[in-house]
Image: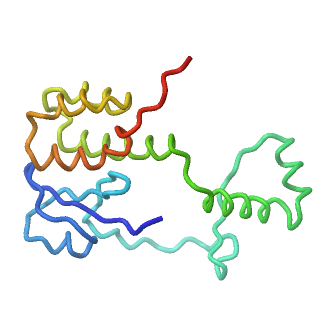
């Protein structure tokens, strides 16, 4: 996975792009900062210090315990694997993370990122709902038509985020 970059907006105008430090150094009051990879709005408020909970799992190894819900037959299979269930799950996750991303998954990830930014920057703009529908349908012409009247910086940023979702629309179901 590539290192994430960020883009900051203030009143619908792009004010900075780049790594998070460069974007946060932009001289603006209360910008909206988005991840270019996920479309997630970045919190600029530092997290509050909270008392540390007792460590679970194997903290020296960076392991954290979480709940996984599986069917009994899945637990049976995992338990029979070398190293037990946890080791088998770690191997499966590592193999999946190294595998190339399926084109449909990449399109969906791009559409989700563009949709998150669209809702934050232009959710109440004329044509926003139609633009979201076009985005998920992979309809490049309709997406650009619906966003054409929006502020240039917003329109251009959304077009860049949406490009992988609009480049090759999935075939319609048979």
Q: Which color scheme does this rendered protein use?
A: rainbow
**Horizontal side of residue 173 vs 55, given as left or right:** left
Query: Residue 152 at what x, y percent from top left?
Result: 9, 46
The residue located at (16%, 75%) in the rendering is 25
Extreme residue toward the right, this view: 80
The residue located at (43%, 46%) in the rendering is 109
Out of 20 and 161, give the one closest to the viewer. 161
Quadrant of residue 118 in the image? top left
Extreme residue toward the bottom, this view: 60
Indicate whether 125 appears above or below 109. Answer: above
- Callout count: 0
Indicate whether 72 appears above or below 139. Answer: below
Query: Residue 133 at what x, y percent from top left?
Result: 32, 26
Indicate whether 32 appears above or below 111. Answer: below
**Horizontal side of residue 60 vs 89, given as left or right:** left
The residue located at (38%, 40%) in the rendering is 165
**Horizontal side of residue 8 vs 173, given as left or right:** left
Quarter of the image with the C terminus is top right
Query: Residue 136 at what x, y percent from top left?
Result: 38, 31
Indicate whether 49 appears above or below 89. Answer: below
The residue located at (43%, 66%) in the rendering is 2
Query: Residue 171 at what x, y percent from top left?
Result: 49, 27
Out of 164 and 153, give the one closest to the viewer. 164
**Horizontal side of residue 71 vs 116, given as left or right:** right
């Amino acid at each position: 996975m590539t290192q994430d970059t960020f883009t900051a907006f203030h009143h619908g105008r792009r004010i900075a792009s780049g790594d998070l430090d460069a974007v946060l150094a932009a001289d603006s009051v209360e910008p909206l900062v988005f991840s270019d990879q996920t479309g997630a709005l970045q919190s600029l408020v530092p997290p509050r210090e909270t008392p540390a909970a007792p460590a679970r799992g194997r903290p020296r190894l960076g392991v954290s315990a979480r709940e996984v819900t599986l069917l009994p037959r899945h637990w049976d299979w995992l338990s029979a694997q070398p190293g037990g269930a946890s080791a088998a799950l770690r191997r499966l996750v590592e193999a999946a993370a190294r595998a190339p991303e399926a084109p449909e998954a990449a399109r969906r990830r791009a559409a989700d990122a563009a949709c998150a930014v669209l809702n934050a920057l232009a959710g109440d703009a004329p044509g926003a709902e139609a633009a979201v529908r076009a985005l998920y349908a992979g309809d490049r012409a309709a997406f650009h038509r619906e966003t054409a009247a929006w502020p240039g910086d917003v329109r251009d940023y959304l077009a860049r985020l949406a490009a992988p979702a609009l480049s090759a629309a999935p075939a319609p179901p048979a």
